Image (cartoon, rainbow, N blue to C red):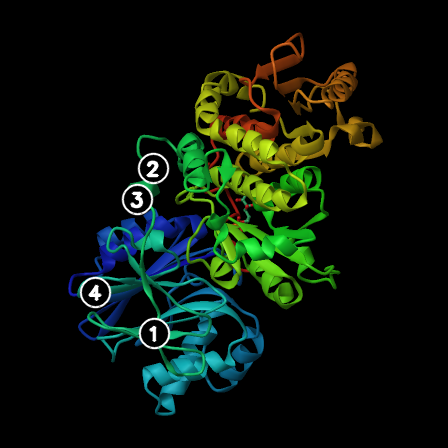
Amino acid sequence: MCGIVGAIAARPVAGILLEGLRRLEYRGYDSAGMAVLNQGQIGRLRRIGKVQALADACAQQSLPGHLGIAHTRWATHGKPSEQNAHPHMSGERLAVVHNGIIENFEPLKRELEQQGYVFTSETDTEVVAHLLDRELKTGLDLLAALRKTMEFLEGAFALGVIHADQPEQLLTARKGSPLVIGVGIGENFIASDQLALLPVTDRFMFLEDGDIAQLEAERIQVWDAQGQVAERAISTFEHGQGSAEKGEFRHFMLKEIYEQPRVMQAVLEGRIASGHLLEQAFGSDAGAVFDRVKQVQIVACGTSYHAGLVAKYWIEELVGIPCMVEVASEFRYRPVVLPEDTLLLTLSQSGETADTLAALREVKARVLATLAICNVPGSSLVRESDLSLMTNAGPEIGVASTKAFTSQLVALMLTTIALGRRHGLSADKETALVAALEQLPELFQQLLALDGPIEAMSAHFAEKRHALFLGRNVLYPVAMEGALKLKEISYIHAEAYPAGELKHGPLALVDKEMPVIAVAPRNGMLDKLKANLQEVRARGGELFVFAGCEESIQSQEGVHVIHLPALPPVLDPIAFTLPLQLLSYHVAVLKGTDVDQPRNLAKSVTVE
Ligand code: F6R
């Protein structure tokens, strides 16, 4: 939530900051702002709305200068407005950008007001600017003032700070919110993630919790939470730069859906060979951990949580050990029971989701080991987990998660195989599973050929206000994911039910205004699902069925069927997802919503 970017360079930085903000816009887009130091004065521009509004303002009123900070906001404290937009200043000479939440800002604000500070915004961030100013006035230098200020702050933050009297330094600090330093040649940068800085560098330094860093054009110095000088490794960005661009696609979401054949290849690469899983992909210590695992606890949020629900079916069926799944925001706040030898498995595209991270930290000491399945190397979740498996999906920019989900499913199947080996999964069965996974890139290519018929189907939804998704067994979480996609980007209210629950309540909602979308596999559950679909038809409900094979269900009046290509049943949850993604996408396009940046949402939920 919120994106920050900063730069110190020999060249003007405003363009770099603007491009950084555009790339961070997925993190929040209700207002944006920038502060640049030029000839001893800080120039600041802030605009309500998207980064483009700020870019337009910059075109009218340039902000020359070699040191600057910028921010794109997702409102937490105070409505979206120019006054609440960052950077926030104390006086004319100090500017701050912040991502995170200062939980104790109210008492701090009262104290500062009593000391004569006048607040011009409703944000929690403004206390940081005034605290810094207050500490500077006690005679501390900027670095010491920042260190002192951090002592007062409770909550999570990543900060960028500039001061008119310090034209040679950009200060930054982080605790609980993501921040990377981009290492350039004769110039250095900060940002909420690496993508923001790819046009200017591919070398990054990740700060630890509690770190403060001082960036000069030629030098970076880091101090840890104890104030000791710290060394932080520099790593090179792992994805190709082109993958963060929209290319010929109209939206990032569509591009990311279409990337899935390649993503399926990438998540399998180096993880399977000659019909077997290469267990070392989980890290050299993984084997010893997997030997001891007696149950799995999965924790995640949103789409990642749905991937976890699919894994529960797989782990309990193919491994035969218990698997519990819970949303992180619930899990972290209750006294959970974790039996001996539990593997805590966290799932996250970003690796920075606040609730998932908090859940990990909460129980880390009480589990056998922690495994993160994640898409962002170097993210907090990966760094703080014992084991990790990257999903290698490449940057996901669309707020609605697509390729991240399907790649998580593949990574979860690999985890299932690793655990299954210890619990009676035969070598033959492993080979069959691996052979099925190997079909995924080609299968996804075939699934994309359904785009036309799905686009045609989407016309039935554009005027609807509600939709019901049905699935059974391992496709129930896939139906949940389909409903989430539809609601978040088209704003059509959508719910998913296990089909067997229909007559226990939701059937009351069914009439011709309530389209029902069913994912129909070709396993033993199909006949039961067909009976449920009859119940819907009998009440005038219109059915949209994604079916597993030609013979199973045919289109007829009020029943629209799209058949998927033949596929090994174990791939059902991975394969059935793509058509549902396309359906949501086309409905949203028809409705004219902002597909990549749906209202009220942001990617990477780094606050609670
Ligand atoms: C939905 C979506 C969100 C995320 C959730 C968790 O399309 O993107 O529900 O899945 O915020 O995010 P990560 O996976 O980054 O932890």
Residue 159, labelled with which disc?
Answer: none
Q: Is residue 306 above or below residue 572?
A: below
Which residue is depicted at the point 41% across and 78% down? Answer: 224
Q: Which residue is mark 4?
A: 187
Please name which of the two marks, 3 or 4, marks the residue nearer to the observer: 3
Going from N to C along the chain, the mark reached first, 3 or 1, is: 1
Q: Position of residue 269 (x, y in %)?
A: 41, 39
Badge 3 element: loop
Going from N to C along the chain, the mark reached first, 4 or 1, is: 4
Q: Position of residue 547 (x, y in %)?
A: 62, 18
Given residues 357 and 608, the one toward you in this image is 357
Residue 246, labelled with which disc?
Answer: 2
Name the residue type under label 1: Glu
- Within 10 Å of disc 2 (Cα), the crowding (few <14, some 14-19, many 20+) is some
Between the residue at mark 3 and the residue at mark 1, the CA separation in whole angstroms equals: 27 Å
Between the residue at mark 4 and the residue at mark 2, the CA separation in whole angstroms equals: 27 Å
Q: Position of residue 282 (x, y in %)?
A: 50, 51
Residue 251 sits in quarter: top left
Between the residue at mark 3 and the residue at mark 4, the CA separation in whole angstroms equals: 22 Å
Residue 240, labelled with which disc?
Answer: 3
Name the residue type under label 3: Gly
Residue 45 in view (yes/no): no
Going from N to C along the chain, the mark reached first, 2 or 1, is: 1
Q: Is residue 241 above or below residue 74?
A: above
Q: Which residue is mark 1?
A: 231
Residue 147 sits in quarter: bottom left
Asked if disc 4 and disc 2 are in contact, CB closer than 8 Å, the reply is no
Badge 4 element: loop
Q: Is mark 4 within 8 Å of ligand 1?
A: no
